[in-house]
Image (cartoon, coloured by chain):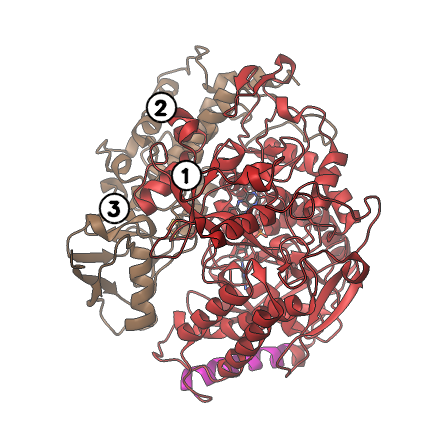
Chain colours: A red, B brown
Amino acid sequence: MNLQDTIITDVLIIGAGLAGERAAVAARERGLGVTILSMVPPRRSHSTAAQGGMQASLGNSAMGQGDNPDIHFQDTVKGSDWGCDQEVARLFVEAVPIAVRQMSYWGVPWNRVTAGRKTLPDGRVIEDKKEFEGLITARDFGGTAKWRTCYTSDGTGHTLQYTMDSIVIAQGITVHDRTEAIALIHDGGKCLGVVVRCLRTGGLRVYLARATVIASGGYGRLYTASTNAVINEGTGMSLALDTGVVPLGNMEAVQFHPTGMVPVWILITEGARGDGGYLLDKNLYRFMPDYEPNKKELASRDVVSRRMVQHMRKGLGVDSPYGPHLWLDIRHLGAKHINTNLREIANICKNFNGIDPVRDLIPVRPTQHYSMGGVRTDIDGRAYGLKGLFAVGEAACWDLHGFNRLGGNSLAETIVAGMVVGEKIADYALGADLDWAYPLVKDAVRTQEERIAALASCRDGKENVFALKNEMGEVLMNYVGIFRTGEGLQKAVDQLTALYERSAHLGLHAPAVGANPEMTACLRLPGMIRLALCIAVGALARTESRGSHAREDFPKRDDANWLKRTLAYWDPGCLAPRLEYEPVKITSLPPGDRGYGESSTPKV
Amino acid sequence: MANRNLKINIFRYNPAEPEKKPSMASYPFEELPGLTMFTVLNRIREELDRTLVFDFVCRAAICGSCAMIINGKPRLACKTLTKGLPKEITLLPLPVFKLIGDLSVDTGTWFRHISLKTEAWIHTSAKFDPTAVEERMDNETALRIYEPERCIECGCCIAGCATANIRDDFMGAATINRVARFMVDPRDERTPGQYFDVIGCDEGTFGCMGLMACDNNCPMEIPLQYQLAYVRRKMAAFGLGGWKGTGRTGEPQHHRAGRSAS
Ligand SMILES: Cc1cc2nc3c(=O)[nH]c(=O)nc-3n(C[C@H](O)[C@H](O)[C@H](O)COP(=O)(O)OP(=O)(O)OC[C@H]3O[C@@H](n4cnc5c(N)ncnc54)[C@H](O)[C@@H]3O)c2cc1C
Ligand code: FES
């Protein structure tokens, strides 16, 4: 290690997605020096892929009339199946209208209310009032009592990210793209910064900061079939887990999106169903109303996904070389609507499947989509276990989403958490010293240098990183998916443990100087398997069904025993996580009926 | 029908080994139905050559990471199906941008620089008031901003542009399109003169030779020709002594129309 490759800053943010950039802006506005790290240029972050929208109870649209933060709060808590932290949910619903309007002020071209009568695809007639014309409008998303999802056509994540990044640029915030944080530097009580590998050159650098923020997004790519970007491998969560002192919260809570397009798993946004799309089976029968008479296709995601699998298990799926699937039908929305409001869906269908949704049905199946779990933080975004470490966005378990996130609540979380936690980060950084324990830093770098040298020389073996990664993805798909059983989960744990042991023997098959992509994969994989084990072990232990965690052998929610959050720690040198639990904070809405889902409707 | 046997030719160069000359490598690949270059490249890396460098992020034509020259044309690799291509497919990195290795180029740094240079953010003197409802805007205006806003900065228009290939300082269609996005946005208070300083020059709108390869190459199908003409017309009008505001929707003098309404 030489000091020339050491960079010092007030606030270091790992991740340039929406959460990281919003937090960076908050800290910068308080006069702090901010450096953002990202594996990719900020505008390529996964946030740009979000199409559907962002929830905020503005109540401007006809179907949003009367909406307010209270109703948003109730939807969020019910959606979470009472797994979320209600203090966080309350703070969130109050702040999100401000966040949406601020994004508008910064430049997001939100779609606006146009006055007049409109006929919905189901025949209902609604009227948008003149007095709301020109204010931010909203569309329907699953699991919400009102139309609350603000959007920009089919590119909400794109416009949010580009706007946020334009402010990052305007404020002169430093961004180091094509860098990957590979280890946190800490002394067991306090986080000092990170060791970073440059993805241009393969070289290591050190970043020291008063406050370090994990904003690295989700881990979808642990699963073989995921809607997530290929860089979503949970690396930020691994860094925290690897410290041994920072726990991950509720890792068993994994969301599946009902409509991943077969066979490439690209997401067809919920906006398609929100705008009136139907799900059909192999007989072209619309089956959702049978299961969910009230919400139909727009029950929460966990419920719709399970109903789809349930229906396919009855032999009513459409057979294909990629396994059974169902159809999404938006043809009745008409060419004009599809080619403007749902243009990106139309493009995806054409480009990646050669079909035109104006005329054709879209093959869909539930696909891994979102990680509710992540680095456990308190309401101020402070990670448990290490001072000076924060987490925001999908990487965090702030715990807004509990066991199921509502569509549109994630973009909203990134902006709100960035805004609110950003202030707490600034407060902390302004009062904190920069620690500069040279031996500690040197050790952290040396550990990484040794790992890299061992992989390059195949010191510990020559296990094939790509093969191991694929096996991990299959184990998760097979046993830690939408429906889970004790037996299956035990298999998953056993197989993942074996893979984890093998991952200690990875070696490069093709050494190369520079930023060798095989080295990148080798450095990530053991951490990814640790995350997979946290998911599987947590799911095995949780003998109830809640939100997206559906145990066939324990089909009921069990508030008496399981109204609690899982905390997974990884003690150094161990082969499995250690689980602890903490109570879930219930402030105003005691556990009850969600109003949709298996517990609320008769068996079909 | 039997699957075709494809031959994939890929440009190879690792800047960390400057002593090794750039070269082309060929890989055999059996075509499957619905095959895209995303799958081809990943499988080549996993099965045939682990050192191969390329960029994918979203693999869904949303993030702009994966542009490269495919059989002579700049395209997004993730949304290029092999089906429409001949059996022999040649992949080169985008020109103009700095090469990182093999098929990977540094579009990120390039676009960031251009954002800084054109100050591609909303310039406003208004202060954000967290207690107020949002300013009104008509939906047509929002949609008109969204049209150029859709650019994903993949670099295809720049790589295929004759001017950008011979002149380092030419800002290219994506940049001019980005400026158009701010020009139609009533929230941006920049005057025609300020825009002129940014873009009314040879590096900007007047450097374009009008060959319009950009328009054909845009994977987002943004009407770049229209956006370029729009900016050029505005700048020419300003250069000739005045930006004639006619009240046609979307023109920058409209600015304040929405401001008082809320
Ligand atoms: C296809 C799709 C559609 C979606 N649509 C919606 C929607 O309509 N509404 C909604 O609310 N939500 C939606 N979501 C969810 C939402 O988009 C994400 O949860 C959210 O954008 C995550 O933002 P983030 O800032 O936390 O992380 P990301 O945007 O994923 O950003 C992570 C950042 O961290 C960086 N990074 C990661 N690891 C490291 C490391 N080790 N070192 C350095 N940098 C690192 C990356 O480069 C990136 O910049 C969707 C998700 C998907 C998959
Ligand atoms: S990988 Fe995102 S555009 Fe191709």
3 or 2: mark nearer the eye? 2
Residue A284 position in % (x across, y down) = 41, 39
- Quadrant occupied by the N terminus of chain A: bottom right
The residue positioned farthest toward the right in the image shown: A587
Mark 2 — residue?
A: B230
Instruction: Estimate the spatial distance between the alpha carbons at disc 3 and disc 2, rounded to whole Å.
Output: 23 Å
Which residue type does callout 1 highlight? Answer: Leu
Q: Residues within 10 Å of mark 1 (few under 14, many from 20)?
A: some
Relative side of A13 to B106, left or right: right
* Marks 2 and 1 share the same chain: no
Q: Chain of mark 2?
A: B
Mark 3 — residue?
A: B165
A114 magenta-colored: no
Q: Chain of mark 3?
A: B
Residue at 65% in and 69% down: A540
Magenta segment boundaries in residue numbering: A441-458
What type of secondary structure mainly makes up the magenta span?
helix
